[in-house]
Image (spheres, helix red, strand yellow):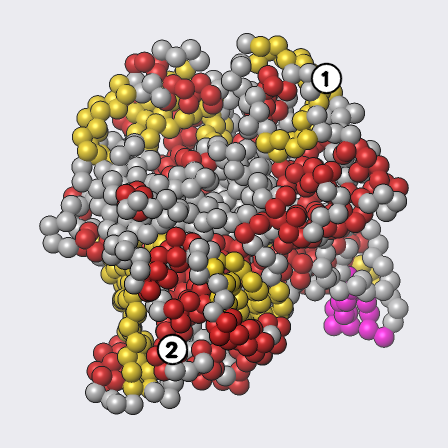
Amino acid sequence: MARIRTTVDGLVYEDDVEPRMLLVQYLRERLGKTGTVIGCDTSNCGACTVHLDGLSVKSCSVLAVQANGSEVLTIEGLERDGQLHPMQQAFHDNHALQCGYCTPGMIMQSIDLLGENPDPSEQEIREGIEGNLCRCTGYQNIVRAVQDAASKMKPGASPTAEAGAKQTVAGGGA
Amino acid sequence: MTTTENAPTQEIGRDRRRKEDRRLITGRTRWTDNQALTGLLHISVVRSPFAHAEIKGIDTSAAKQVPGVVAVYTAADLGADQVQLPCAWPVTKDMKAPQRPALAGSRVNFAGEGVAVVVARSAAIAKDAAEQVEVDYDELEPVLDMEAALADGATLVHPEIGTNANAQWVFDSGEAGSGGSVAEALQKAESDDDQIIVKRRFRQQRLVPVFMEPRSTVVDPSGEQLVMWSSTQVPHILKTMLALTLGLPEHKVRVIAPDVGGGFGGKIAVAPEEVLTLLVAQKLGKPVKWTETRSESLLTAHHGRDQIQDLTMSVTKDGTITGLDVKLLADMGAYLGLVGPGVPILGAFMFNAIYKIPAYRFDCTNVFTTKTLTDAYRGAGRPEATFGIERLMDEAALELGMEPMEFRRKNWIKHEEFPYTTVSTLTYDTGNYEAATDQALQMFDYDGLRREQQERRERGDVKQLGIGISTFTEMCGLAPSRVLGSLDYGAGGWETAAIRMLPTGKAEVVVGVSPHGQGHETAFSQIVADQLGVPFDDVEILHGDTQSSYRGLDTYGSRSLAVGGIAVVKAAEKVIEKAKPIAAHMLEASEGDLEFSGGRFTVKGTDKGVGIQDIALAVFAAHDYPEGIEPDIDAHATFDPENFSFPHGTHLCAVEVDTETGFVQLYKYVCVDDVGNVINPLIVEGQVHGGLAQGIAQALFEEAAYDDQGTLLSGTLVDYTLPTAADLISFDTANTTTASTTNPLGVKGVGEAGTIASTPAVVNSVLDAIRHLGVKDIDMPTTPYRVWTAINDAKGTAGRGDEANVASPGAGLGSTASDISKGDTQGGHL
């Protein structure tokens, strides 16, 4: 067992974990953060994507012990005071989800994508979310949602959106 | 709770954003694997690595010593080898149905079949201990090739049934009286200088549905009713089948499908693991969970497609089809799934497609092999048929020297000919193939792309352009119960809905269909809002729990709206009917003077009225209501459709094929679909997008390939290559509308249309790009390796041996062992 201390969605946790425990297992099984899901066992699907110190990671490819001392942001920590993150709102507005299983990972990855490239082309979006599989939507509305969020998260686009954008770039947390 | 004075805006037809989304985009989800119950135990299934083997012994002693392990069971310990998992579709009277156990007893029949189960306090411990279970196998010959399996002396998958043939199902229009005899038509064509005969063999490769949420089941046996949560499309069927299969009293079982992350047919099942979870929970008296890994899912959840199609068409030289003969071999895998043997049979009604074919025969033999069983996958039988006929239409046009769209136009049913009874005995109610095609051609710039194609040919560009067509229809909205009865299906095709009008005027609508991504909560709320004249937000759709929704036949076959949605309409009509005498009483008017509109009963010619939501409160109080009626306006309705639903459309695909690498890049995709009246255009468009992606994936990317020992080679998402966002393009979609005349909303199904239509459009376009180089056909998926090989074989410069035998297991997939042994390393796509 190894002792780890992490901040997850703004709360501090200390736990003893098996060294082999994956971050996604720690989130789901120990913290009850079941918003983050597991879709495969080969790190192909990206359903488990979260932010680790502000960058997207597939939480099935990170050991819980590697998150020691780090800040983790999951889909459950995006909403602020009942206000959806602009990316969440854009997924809703553009019908970018059907069954919703890939959605948490897809949203977390899309936010990371805009952190790196605030004004991506369609092809850049398609390549930026290539590591996240969706079986329902054919990706078309996901691409639209990311474009929509990008336009709303541009500096000066709107006060609330800008707050969301800053929060993202800072890596979330509380 | 009072309704507005003015009639609310019409909800049907609005692009309402989905009610379902809020939880899903914030992570407040209830997937089955999220269930955490006190004392919950976890199971892991020990699986056979061999496709066909006798089990000589199982040593569980080491596994039992692992700390945290509660029990290790073999089949005999649980009686799991005595279980007969159900097949609800005995397609013929003499169909051969082997026993399908929940765990193998003495013999395994596919790689991945369960042989033992470990129960532990955590999933990780259960998996660790499962690796400690020692199983002694004696390998048997695998059975992998359908044609070889049917030959005399073939190794039998199930020796006890004496054959590898499951059933043969034949339809002959001459015998049915719906058309002529194909044998005669083909004979006549052979001796007729004005006719040609076109024969082709096509391969429908094996696919895996790959829903994103792996399957999971939790069983809690501690209450009076045993509760099963399961990631299923069919909670009602599962409940009844568990009762019938295990001898449980049906009223002691409750099945809940909570949030379900996709299905595509892959979760229409009574899975062995669902039964195992239940048996273990009963034995230990503790709640138990099973959640599969993705690799387990690819290996053991049912597969789809997998047919060899031998097609023969006779056609006059001026392009009029005179006969169509279809001979299929359909791979069932090792056992029969819930509806597996019926899946290829659905194709019997669809090979004739949108065309007027005077003589038609369909002959399908289902075959057992030692592979994972096949069952419904998005489209179920219709994609296979549509692929066959739409590929054959191109081949026939080619031999006739006709433009492929002109050949189709010459043979399809004209819009003024509806309703039209086909040679396979279905009556298509409405459609307009000309309108959909004209719009698609215009959106696509068909003539412009043909010019560009010609220019690239003339320049000899490395990247050649190909254009492919698919003009399709399909039968969905499963299904009229009497028709299902005539096909020996084990259940009806009706659907049920109930409306509960609450005292505050809100409506709870209980439906028997069971969504897993389709958006039922939104679409059905729109329907109820219009029917009852209540606000959209005042409607809650309840589903997926047999305790609240006790009657239903669940979701598959694009039936939820065309059947389930109509049950909702019928229930709403009954609510209004029940409310009418109460309204009359409240308004001191006679029922005959009342009219209902916008949620209010009004007395004709006056401004007196009462809202339906106020009536709900009045019957709750029940202080004053007419004699002789119950104080209740709730209603329950069951709708049995009179016909299938026949969406149709024209799909046009352009691809660029790199003639140096064989890489296929989508260039443009246009589809115009007629799905009848649209409840929510946003949801319809989403269904089309997703359907297209899956159909395109069959054409270009996906295959469940086995090696010559029967081992699944594409057992992870590294090897089973789902398309990513970067593999696809944005599709141009549109709708034409001919309202269905067989249901009051005029709707048709949409869930499977994109998948059914797109595959042949893509393959036709790939071939169209390189046919001038001498390429005649390429098996799906048309990976770069296959396209490159086909081009080089056509040039006569490849030197890579004979073309792969398409019927052999795993033939031709870039990454198979046989290809690698030829010294080629260009596998897979991308």
- Number of disc labels: 2
> In the depicted view, which residue is nearer to us: A71 or B792?
B792
- Helix, strand or loop status at disc 1: strand
Q: Can you see residue B556?
A: no
Q: In the image, what residue occupies the spot 37% across and 28% down?
A: B45
Q: Mark 1 belongs to which subunit?
A: A
Query: Could you tell me which residue is drawn at 60 percent across and 19 percent down?
Result: A66
Per the rendering, the mark at residue B398 is 2
Considering only vertical position in the picture, is B774 above or below B559?
below
Membership of B593 in magenta stretch = yes
Depth check: give the residue in front, B599 or B747. Answer: B747
Which mark is on residue B623? none
Residue sitting farthest toward the left: B153
The magenta segment is: B591-605
**Residue B402 visible in the current orientation:** yes
Q: Which residue is mark 1?
A: A12
* Callout 2: SS: helix
Q: Which of the chains bears the disc numbered 2?
A: B
Q: Quadrant of residue A75?
A: top right
